[in-house]
């Protein structure tokens, strides 16, 4: 979700509120690059931000910019009858808003824990094996592997390539590009539509408001 549907990483921006952005970015980048245990890195980052108010966390979440072309791309897919699922290492405080705005059918994400209005920890529902979460809905929806498109950017997303017929690297780490079927370098998610059209011999059209 972050780096694909959102044009931002939540925790580093949140860290700016207490001048810990450099520390949080360093851990975030290592996680995206697959250089550290992702779950451990997430807990470490949240712990560093412990004590921030719920209002601050919500304000930052509500201001995260949506990726260029995400609204139009989701609209085109939904109009053609596609289901859209997001599997995110991010948090419900940010994903709930995006689910509503983009018309996502389902979102798997983690949860920030607040105590007395202050950030106190994290409940990890989505691990570095994101495919484990995705398989639950795929089975429920009875979707075939070849009909599934996955669009990701980080090394912590790579297991999702195991469950799809088309894997797309969106402005991604080199390790992701090496394993992807297609690569998008431009920061515009509408580039996904012609890739899907070519793969499935479709004629999906962007729905411009």
Image (cartoon, rainbow, N blue to C red):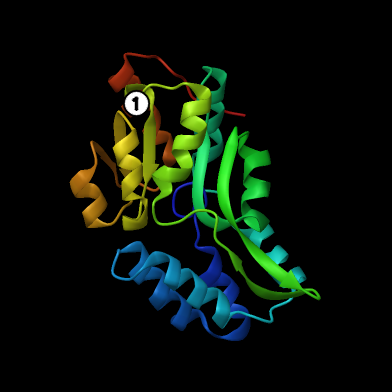
Percent from the top left, x then y, of residue 170?
A: 34, 46
**Farthest-out residue, left:** 178
SS at badge 1: helix
Does 169 appear above or below 173? Answer: above
Q: Nearer the viewer, residue 16 or 51?
A: 51
* Residue 165 visible at all: yes
Residue at screen point 38% across, 21% down? 144
Query: Percent from the top left, x then y, of residue 85?
Result: 52, 36
Q: Nearer the viewer, residue 154 or 193?
A: 154
Tell me how many marks there are: 1
Residue appearing at x 59%, y 72% in the figure: 14
Apparent side of residue 1 relative to residue 177 in the rendered image (left or right):
right
Which quarter of the figure has residue 209? Answer: top right
The picture quadrant where one finds residue 47 is bottom right
User: Is residue 117 rendered to the left or right of residue 108?
Assistant: right
Q: Residues within 10 Å of mark 1 (few under 14, many from 20)?
A: few
Q: Position of residue 58 (x, y in %)?
A: 71, 63
Considering every residue shown, the one lying at the far right of the view is 116
Quadrant of the image occupied by residue 147: top left
Percent across and percent down for residue 96 are: 67, 48
- The residue depicted at 55 percent of the width and 64 percent of the height is 10
Outermost bottom residue: 19
Residue at 43 percent across and 72 percent down: it is 41
As displayed, is residue 3 above or below residue 49? above
Asked if residue 186 is positioned above or below residue 138 in the image, the reply reads below
Q: Is residue 12 above or below residue 2?
A: below
Is residue 65 something one can see in this rendering? no
Q: Nearer the viewer, residue 190 or 102?
A: 102
Identify residue for label 1. 145
């Amino acid at each position: 979700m972050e780096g694909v549907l959102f044009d931002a990483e939540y925790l580093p921006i949140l860290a700016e509120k207490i001048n810990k952005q450099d520390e949080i970015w360093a851990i975030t980048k290592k996680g995206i690059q697959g250089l550290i245990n992702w779950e451990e890195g997430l807990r470490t980052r949240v712990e560093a931000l412990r004590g921030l108010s719920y209002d601050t966390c919500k304000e930052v979440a509500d201001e995260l910019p949506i990726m260029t072309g995400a609204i139009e791309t989701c609209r085109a897919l939904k109009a053609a009858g596609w289901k859209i699922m997001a599997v995110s290492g991010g948090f419900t405080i940010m994903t709930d808003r995006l689910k509503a705005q983009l018309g996502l059918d389902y979102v798997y994400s983690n949860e920030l824990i607040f105590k007395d209005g202050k950030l106190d920890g994290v409940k990890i529902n989505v691990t570095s094996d994101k495919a484990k979460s995705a398989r639950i809905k795929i089975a429920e929806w009875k979707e075939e592997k070849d009909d599934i498109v996955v669009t990701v950017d980080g090394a912590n997303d790579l297991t999702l390539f195991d469950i799809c017929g088309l894997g797309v690297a969106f402005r991604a780490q080199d390790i992701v590009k090496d394993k992807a079927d297609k690569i998008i370098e431009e920061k515009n998610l509408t580039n996904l539509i012609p890739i899907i059209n070519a793969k499935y011999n479709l004629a999906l059209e962007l729905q411009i408001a």
